[in-house]
Image (cartoon, coloured by chain):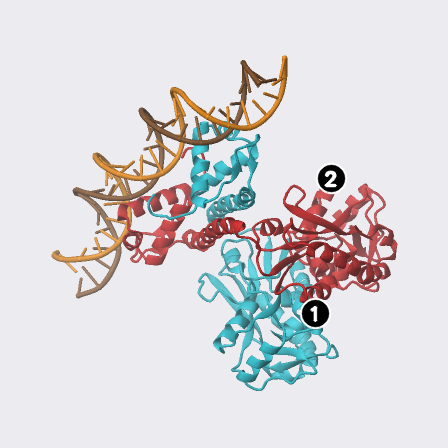
Chain colours: A red, B cyan, C brown, D orange
Amino acid sequence: MAIADLPFDLSSLTVFLAVCDNGSMAAAARALKVTQPAISQTIADLENRLGTTLFDRNVRPLALTPSGTVLRQYAQGMLAEVRLVATGIQKMRLGRVPQLRMGVVDSLARALSTSISDFMYERVGRLIVHAGLTETHATALLTRQIDCVIGVDEMEDVSGLERWPLFEEPYLLLYPEQETPPRDTQELRDFLGRQPFIRFSQRSRTGAEIERFLRRLRIDVPFQQEFDLPYGVYATCRNRGVAITTPLCLYEAGYTQDCGLLCHPLPAPAFHRRLTLVVRRREFGRFPLDLALFLREQLKQEVMPALGTLFPAFVQQMRVLN
Amino acid sequence: MAIADLPFDLSSLTVFLAVCDNGSMAAAARALKVTQPAISQTIADLENRLGTTLFDRNVRPLALTPSGTVLRQYAQGMLAEVRLVATGIQKMRLGRVPQLRMGVVDSLARALSTSISDFMYERVGRLIVHAGLTETHATALLTRQIDCVIGVDEMEDVSGLERWPLFEEPYLLLYPEQETPPRDTQELRDFLGRQPFIRFSQRSRTGAEIERFLRRLRIDVPFQQEFDLPYGVYATCRNRGVAITTPLCLYEAGYTQDCGLLCHPLPAPAFHRRLTLVVRRREFGRFPLDLALFLREQLKQEVMPALGTLFPAFVQQMRVLN
DNA sequence: GAGACAGTATAAATTTTTCTTATAATGCGC
DNA sequence: GCGCATTATAAGAAAAATTTATACTGTCTC
């Protein structure tokens, strides 16, 4: 097909793996019930498209080149994913699953793990909790790999989902107490350029939001270190560096007021992080509503007071939503 | 090709996405510079292969079916991965990259985050830390998405890597203090069958090791809840349930001796978890050796004493390796 | 409600891609 | 060096994909 300018196609990968697994093109041909030249020409075409050789033809049995080794690792996963997608799409018509799998943003993992677990005991036969990055949760939610998400809502565009806003909190600047915090955008730019900037992983929604915020202010900061988890960011700042983070992330990381780091509002337009419960529409009856109400109550009764103690200057900017 | 019995190919996905993005088959055809029937027939073939319709033809512009929506989410990622793989394979010949990206197993994130960050400041221009699951780190390591891994070594079969064993610790049983711990395998089976079993995610190496261990003992436990992170497992056990975990995981989770949970050796052959530093061979000169020595020193000086205090009965079974 | 226009489906013809057949060249064990 | 298995490659055949032609359908405007 002249349509797709693709580096390879999946059937080529299947052939490639057959050669890897069988040790020769001839044996692969026998296994796949085609002729040897079909295999030889397919491999040659694949190599041509990728611009590198995948097998060392000078030895018997064929040896993989380093590039071939890498492709082999990836090929298995890609072909598995293809079958998984096809199967998942067909299963979409078969109805609900007998367990609940949820994705929870990492900064709520500690704050709410016990609550969630407790809440679920009488309501769900089996609970599976995926903590950490929520970047891929939209897809996982839609393909039924998970059933609900508690995190930064990245899915405004996606229909078929129900959303319950839970909590809103401000982003803030975390800095060493001997420093003077910036009062405007220009000072912020200088400030961030003068010290190591420790940021959240760009794989996370939080990291991406912060990056977009800085870009909007035309602040281009070379980051020094980057971490997936709130603790990594916090721990590194205690040593050296500054960061943009949130009260919940700091609470998650174990922040204390005598740790040598202070929090300061960002000298810029309001910049908040909002956490939302998201589920697929009409799949769990009342359950999502009950869960949302429960989570809001927990945030109000347990989390807000703790945050208010740690971050009194930001209390007005944090709220449980409804 | 008669070779590959695949549910779809990548060029079909490209066509599918073009229709999604352009809102009609005719517009997609124009965008891809082919005729409309080529698009129509490709989509029809794709639907036929997947066994489901992807578009609702009764409305204009075309609407996606739920299955179509799911496939759309996946298609982007798959095509992106294909290009990434092809690019990565070509970049393999261009030499090293100017930054260090490491994957760290979640139970070491707190214990070593500050140490690692500190160690890296003078040695690496830029550091990116991916905490959490290490399941996919083998591939990431080989394809240069990350440069080293600290975790449970899943990569015995993979050549081209260097390994430095770091630490070994026993798995143990975590249970409520009012219970009597099991003394043999049969009692363990009864014990685990009587209470909610809280386990680590099967996506993690730790979770998989525990599952294999139980299978080897012919112990089939219906788990009640499953968590990615050590804290989730620990917090839930504090509420209700038992778990198999390790001293490091408990340390990570913030275990204290007055939490109402006790630790007991597993009544079975020695079952240990081993943490290893893995890097690609000959890429960073002395650096991996220095890092391994440094990590061992940190484990010996900082982590072992803390673990010894928390878990005195297991001190003999924990050791820094060399 | 009718007409115009754009879009979709489908059959047949054409083009492109992939596979097979045939054969020469090469690796490797004895 | 010989024999056997494997790989590469050219040419022909078969299969797949695209184009051309045309009928049918959705939607907007009058």
Residue A231, quarter of picture: bottom right
Residue A205 in the image: above or below residue B315: above
| Crowd band around label 2 with a 10 angstrom C-alpha radius: few (<14), some (14–19), many (20+) | few
Residue A102 in the image: above or below residue C19: below
Front residue of this view, candidates A216 and B236: B236
The residue lying at 71 percent from left, 73 percent from top is B238
Instruction: Work out which quarter of the rendered image holds the C terminus of chain B and state it.
Output: bottom right
> In which chain is the residue bearing label 1?
B
Residue under circle 2? A216
Residue B103 in sight: yes
Front residue of this view, candidates B97 and B138: B138
Instruction: Work out which quarter of the rendered image holds the N terminus of chain B and state it.
Output: top left
Kind of residue indicated by mark 2: Arg
The kind of secondary structure element at disc 1 is: helix
- Where residue A259 appears, x then y in whole percent? 81, 64
Q: Is residue A282 left or right of residue B165?
A: right
Front residue of this view, candidates C24 and A292: A292
Tell me the number on the disc at residue B235: 1
The residue lying at 84 percent from left, 43 percent from top is A184
Q: Between tags 1 and 2, which lies in front?
A: 1
